[in-house]
Image: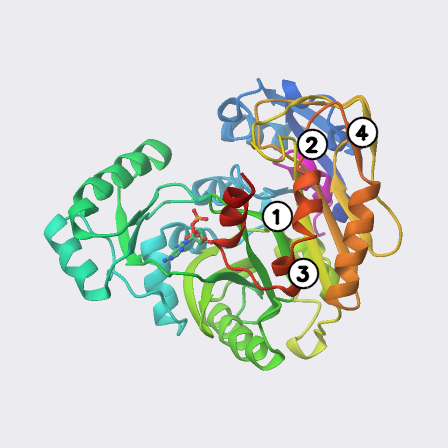
C-alpha cells in the first residue's frame, strides 16, 4: 500500500517544496488553491488541481470542509499541511484522520499540547528542558501577576498562551504598566486567537534565538538534526537564518540536541518538530515548540543532506526514521534569506506583476520559490515570495557565495527585500556572527 497521492493544503513556495519531495518519491500530488492562485507554479506542476474557494484564506486555505471534499474527490490518501494555515490545527488533523486520510504531521494530541504555550512550557519542563523563568501557568489575576513579576524581576514579557507569529506579546518594564499591558495583551490575543489567556516570563535582555530540529517516528525513537540560529528578526519575525549557529560548539550541540531528542522519544513524538530556545550567556531557555515543518528547514537540509519533507512522508506512512543519530553528520554552513515582496526599508507590502524573474544558480545555491516572469503576486497572503539558501564549507565561504547569489537574483516589477539582505551581509557584526534578537531592529533604527 503506502501513500500514493498527497493533497497539499498550502500555497506558495512550501506547496512547491512538498510537490517536489512527493514527485521524487513517485507520489502524485493534488494542489488545492484559491481563485487568486489559479496560476501558481505548484498548481501548474501538480498532477491534479482543485479550486477550493475565493482569495481570503478563511474561505480557502483555512476552509476545512472544502479541503476534505477536495481530498475525497481527488482520491488523495494523504494530506500535507505545510506551515501556517492549518498546519498546527489539531482539529483539522483529527478530521483528516477520521476520513481515513493519512495526516503528514504530528499526533493531534501533541499539536494540542504544544499549541498552548502554557501547556507546552509545563510539558517541556517535565521532559527536562530548561525554561525561561516565569509564571507557572496562565495568569489572570493582576495581583498575582505583580507578585510573579516582582519575584522574577522586571522587565517581563506578557505572552498569549495561543500566540504565534510574534503576535500578542508585550514587554513590561515596571509594575505601573503591568495591569494595562496585561489587559492589552489579553484583548489582542482574544482578537487574534480567540483566547485571552496570557502568561508571564522574564524578558531576556539580549538573547539569541536558537532552535533545534527534531524528528520522531511516533514509536519512541527520535533524533535531532542540530540547531538553527534565527536571531536576525524584525518584529519577532525571522529574516535570515543559519545553521549551525556561530556560537554553539559541537559539544553544546550534542548535549542540548540529545536532551531534545530524548524529550521527543519520551513523548512518542511523530514527524518533524522544532524546539525553540532563547540563548543568553551560554544558557538555553525553552520558549516554544512548533509541531510542523519550518520555513527555515532548508538550512538544516543543507548541512545534514537529509530531505525533511521526504522524511515526514515516510514517517507518516509508518516507516521508521531513515537515519539514526549516529548516521547524522553536520558538514559546512548554510544560510537562508527570506525574500519578501516589500519595500526593503519601509517593509510596505509590494504585491503585483513580476515582469522579469531570474533565479540565482551555481554550486550549492538553492532557490525555493514559485515565482516566474508574468506571475502576479496576490495581495491576500504572506509577502514571502522566495527563499535563497546557500551552502558553503565554511561560514565565510557561505557568506561570499550568498552575496554572489543575491547579485544574480532578478525580480522586477515589485519591490523586494533583496537590497536589505545585501546590505545586511556587509555588516561587520553579521560577518562575525555577533548579533542577538535585538540587533536587526537597532541597526534599522540607526540606519534611519
Ligand atoms: P511566537 O510563537 O509568536 O513566534 P515565541 O515565543 O516563539 O512567539 O517568541 C518569538 C520571539 O519573541 C522570540 O524569537 C524572541 O525574539 C522574542 N521573545 C519571546 N520570549 C522572550 C523573552 N522571554 N525574552 C525576550 N524575548 C523574547
**For mark 1, what is the residue?**
295
Q: Secondary structure at mark 4?
A: loop
User: What residue is disc 3 on?
Assistant: 431
> CA–CA distance between discs 3 and 1?
23 Å
Q: Decide which of tag 4 and tag 1 comes sooner along the chain.
A: 1
Residue 31: mark: 2
Q: Disc 4 marks which residue?
A: 372
Task: Mark 2: give few (<14), some (14-19) or many (20+) Cα within 10 Å.
Answer: many
**Image side of residue 70 versus residue 1, left or right:** left
Q: Which residues are magenta?
A: 1-19
Residue ID at (47%, 75%): 282
Q: In the current view of this chain or complex, which residue is farthest to the bottom?
A: 251
Residue found at the far left of this picture = 143
Mark 4 to mark 1 CA distance (whole Å): 20 Å
Return the x and y of residue 72 as percentages of the image width and height.
Answer: 62, 31
Q: For residue 373, what is the image quadrant? A: top right
Amino acid at each position: 500500500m503506502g501513500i500514493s497521492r498527497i493533497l497539499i493544503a498550502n500555497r506558495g513556495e512550501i506547496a512547491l517544496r512538498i510537490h517536489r519531495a512527493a514527485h521524487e518519491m513517485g507520489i502524485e500530488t493534488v494542489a488545492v488553491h484559491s481563485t487568486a492562485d489559479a496560476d501558481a507554479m505548484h498548481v501548474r506542476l501538480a498532477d491534479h488541481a482543485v479550486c477550493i474557494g475565493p482569495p481570503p484564506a478563511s474561505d480557502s486555505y483555512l476552509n476545512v470542509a472544502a479541503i476534505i471534499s477536495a481530498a475525497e474527490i481527488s482520491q488523495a490518501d494523504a494530506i500535507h499541511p505545510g506551515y501556517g494555515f492549518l498546519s498546527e490545527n489539531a482539529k483539522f488533523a483529527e478530521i483528516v484522520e477520521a476520513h481515513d486520510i493519512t495526516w503528514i504531521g504530528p499526533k493531534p494530541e501533541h499539536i494540542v499540547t504544544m499549541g498552548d504555550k502554557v501547556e507546552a512550557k509545563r510539558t517541556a519542563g517535565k521532559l527536562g528542558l530548561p525554561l525561561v523563568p516565569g509564571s507557572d501557568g496562565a495568569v489572570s489575576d493582576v495581583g498575582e501577576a505583580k507578585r510573579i513579576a516582582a519575584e522574577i524581576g522586571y522587565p517581563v514579557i506578557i505572552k498569549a498562551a495561543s500566540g504565534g507569529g510574534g503576535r500578542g506579546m508585550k514587554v513590561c518594564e515596571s509594575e505601573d504598566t503591568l495591569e494595562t499591558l496585561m489587559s492589552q495583551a489579553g484583548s489582542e490575543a482574544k482578537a487574534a486567537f480567540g483566547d485571552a489567556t496570557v502568561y508571564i516570563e522574564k524578558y531576556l535582555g539580549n538573547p539569541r534565538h536558537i532552535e533545534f530540529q527534531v524528528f520522531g517516528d511516533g514509536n519512541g525513537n527520535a533524533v535531532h538534526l542540530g540547531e538553527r540560529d534565527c536571531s536576525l528578526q524584525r518584529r519577532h519575525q525571522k529574516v535570515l537564518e543559519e545553521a549551525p549557529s556561530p556560537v554553539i560548539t559541537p559539544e553544546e550541540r550534542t548535549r542540548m540536541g540529545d536532551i531534545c531528542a530524548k524529550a521527543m522519544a519520551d513523548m512518542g513524538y511523530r514527524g518533524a518538530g522544532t524546539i525553540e530556545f532563547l540563548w543568553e550567556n551560554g544558557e538555553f531557555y525553552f520558549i516554544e515548540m512548533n509541531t510542523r515543518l519550518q520555513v527555515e528547514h532548508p538550512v538544516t537540509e543543507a548541512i545534514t543532506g537529509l530531505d525533511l519533507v521526504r522524511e515526514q512522508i515516510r514517517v507518516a506512512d509508518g516507516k521508521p526514521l531513515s537515519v539514526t543519530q549516529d548516521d547524522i553528520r553536520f558538514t559546512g554552513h548554510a544560510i537562508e534569506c527570506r525574500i519578501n515582496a516589500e519595500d526593503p526599508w519601509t517593509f510596505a507590502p509590494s504585491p503585483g506583476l513580476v515582469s522579469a524573474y531570474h533565479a540565482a544558480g551555481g554550486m550549492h545555491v538553492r532557490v525555493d520559490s514559485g515565482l516566474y516572469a508574468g506571475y502576479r503576486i496576490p495581495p491576500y497572503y504572506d509577502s514571502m515570495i522566495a527563499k535563497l539558501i546557500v551552502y558553503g564549507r565554511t561560514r565565510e565561504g557561505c557568506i561570499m557565495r550568498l552575496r554572489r547569489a543575491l547579485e544574480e537574483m532578478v525580480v522586477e516589477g515589485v519591490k523586494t527585500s533583496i537590497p536589505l539582505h545585501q546590505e545586511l551581509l556587509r555588516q561587520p557584526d553579521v560577518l562575525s556572527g555577533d548579533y542577538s534578537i535585538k540587533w536587526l531592529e537597532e541597526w534599522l533604527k540607526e540606519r534611519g
